Image (cartoon, helix red, strand yellow):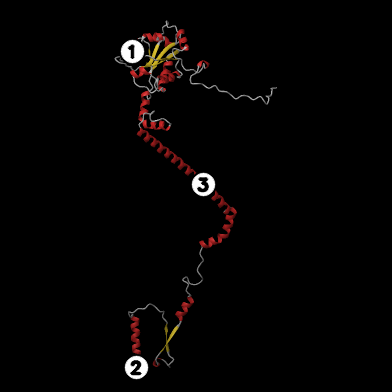
Amino acid sequence: MDKMPEEDDVSSPLEFKMLPLFMDFEDFSICQPAPFSYDDKALLELERCDYTQRITYQMARAGKTARRVRVYADGIYDLFHQGHARQLMQAKNVFPNVYLIVGVCNDELTLRMKGRTVMNGFERYEAVRHCRYVDEIVPNAPWTLNDEFLDEHKIDFVAHDDIPYGAGVVNDIYAPLKARGMFVATERTEGVSTSDIVARIVKDYDVYVRRNLARGYSAKELNVSFLSEKKFRLQNKMDELKSRGKRELTKVKVDIITKWEEKSREFIDAFLLLFGKERLNTFWNESKGRIIQALSPPGSPNGSINGDDPDATDGAESQDEYMELPPEYGAGSGGSIKRKQKRPGPVNHSPSPNDTEEQEHEDVVHERRSD
């Protein structure tokens, strides 16, 4: 049975070993930066190399060597990028068993031969040292390689791209090595170089200056005039206001949508309470008759379609009107003639043929009576 820990026995928290900037890497045997050529580790490797056993290109390619093949690659390695790393990877894998030595030129030689660098010598050394393919660093490397330098570092082959690299009156500084069979070619990575990176910075100069001003750099550190500094700071302030306005607008939109969703839920809940299933059935039963009456209007009353009384019309037309006749037409004074009663019609001032005959008849009767 395991022993139970006592209550007073409190385990100490885990302690992590922090890595200082300048440290002794002897305790870290797996992940170490490459040593400089004057370090003990590099000097020990140099002593173990039997340089009297010269290695040819065919022997190195076949892997039939009694020792590690020492390959040297040199350069400026300013703004260390993936193109540099790929070049060193090719040099490391050009033969089966390679000990890769990388030479880096110092600031004075680089400024005189090529121009100003972005990173200083120490920064460039450290960048190359921490590349996984590098086994050793040679600081203050020469621009051209002579036999004395090759023998000092026991170099078997030199790795570089095959493009002729001139210096002064010399068209290709690697031409003697190519003639002696000590040169192996690597391929450049298209689309990336230190010059390309510098060109990008120059192209977006204002953007990077504004960024660094916002991060706390002074105008003097950025070599910016007083007026340019004020202009860049004003642009930064305007961009900050725009970003803040966009954030606030987005926040307001989100709040409005959230409130609308809440109100819509409340409205739906209230509607369901007022007009639920039972309430809707009751409302339908109560108003069904009204709806049917509204859709079907009542019919006309019995009788004429136009609402007239046919009996009254027929009676009026059947009534007779009697007119007294003169004594000579009848047996007594009670004689009369029967005449239909006409309906009143529209007034017509122009005499019709019937009106003319009746007038002539009345004139004849009047004349006879007068006789």
- Above or below, 353 against 27 in this view is below
Residue closest to the eye, 156 or 118:
118
Disc 1 to disc 2, C-alpha distance: 168 Å
The amino acid type found where label 2 is placed reads: Ser
Residue pictured at 35% horizontal, 82% vertical: 355
Q: Which residue is mark 3?
A: 259
Q: Earlier in the sequence, mark 1 or mark 3?
A: 1
Residue 185 coordinates in the image, percent (x, y): 38, 16
Q: Marks 1 and 2: CB-CB under 8 Å?
A: no
Q: Residue furthest left?
A: 169
Q: Marks 1 and 3: CB-CB under 8 Å?
A: no
The amino acid type found where label 1 is placed reads: Ala
Disc 1 to disc 3, C-alpha distance: 78 Å
Residue 234 coordinates in the image, percent (x, y): 39, 37
Residue 314 coordinates in the image, percent (x, y): 46, 78
Residue closest to the eye, 75 or 95:
75
Residue 175, disc: 1
Local crowd size for mark 2, using a 10 Å CA cut-off: few (<14), some (14–19), many (≥20): few
Q: Residue furthest right?
A: 1
Residue 66, visible in the rendered structure: no
Residue closest to the eye, 157 or 28:
28
- Callout 3 secondary element: helix
Q: Earlier in the sequence, mark 1 or mark 2?
A: 1
Residue 370, disc: 2
Local crowd size for mark 3, using a 10 Å CA cut-off: few (<14), some (14–19), many (≥20): few
Quarter of the image with the C terminus in it: bottom left
Q: Quadrant of residue 46?
A: top left
- Callout 2 secondary element: helix
